[in-house]
Image (cartoon, helix red, strand yellow):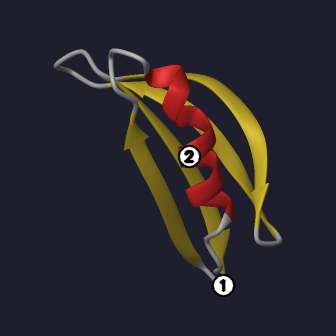
Amino acid sequence: MHVSNAIPISISNLTGVKYNVTLPNGPLQTQMLFVKDSKGILIGYIMGIKDHLKYVADINSMINSLKF
């Protein structure tokens, strides 16, 4: 497993890190890790291989709607 492109991120007043993970069978998974009250919250998703850019706005909208 390879981790790349780590950047800071903020959602619902939580700060965390967003990064990509290359899974053993090849797909690229984006993960976001937050820590709140000694608990870790991990959000992960795999973009489709085809036409993935058209789903970025939908995914970002769903993630930004989360309340922790």
Mark 2: amino acid = Asp
Residue 58, disc: 2
Query: At 54% from the left edge and 22% from the top edge, which residue is drawn?
Result: 53
Residue 68, disc: none
Of residues 56 and 36, the one drawn nearer to the viewer in this rendering:
56
Q: How far apart are marks 2 and 1 (CA)?
A: 29 Å
The residue labelled by disc 1 is 37
Can you say whether 48 is above or below 64 in the image? above
Res 3 seen here: no
Query: At 76% from the left edge and 71% from the top edge, which residue is drawn?
Result: 12
Residue 38 placement, left or right of 10: left
Can you say whether 13 is above or below 61 in the image? below
Residue 8 placement, left or right of 67: right
Residue 61 placement, left or right of 43: right
Q: What is the count of numbered marks? A: 2
Residue 38 percent coordinates (x, y): 60, 80
Q: Label 1, secondary structure: give it.
A: loop
Asked which quadrant contains residue 64, the reply is bottom right
Label 2 crowd (10 A; few <14 / some 14-19 / many >=20): few
Res 58 seen here: yes
Asked which quadrant contains residue 2, the reply is top left
Label 1 crowd (10 A; few <14 / some 14-19 / many >=20): few
Can you say whether 66 is above or below 31 in the image? below
Mark 1: amino acid = Asp
Asked which quadrant contains residue 68, the reply is bottom right
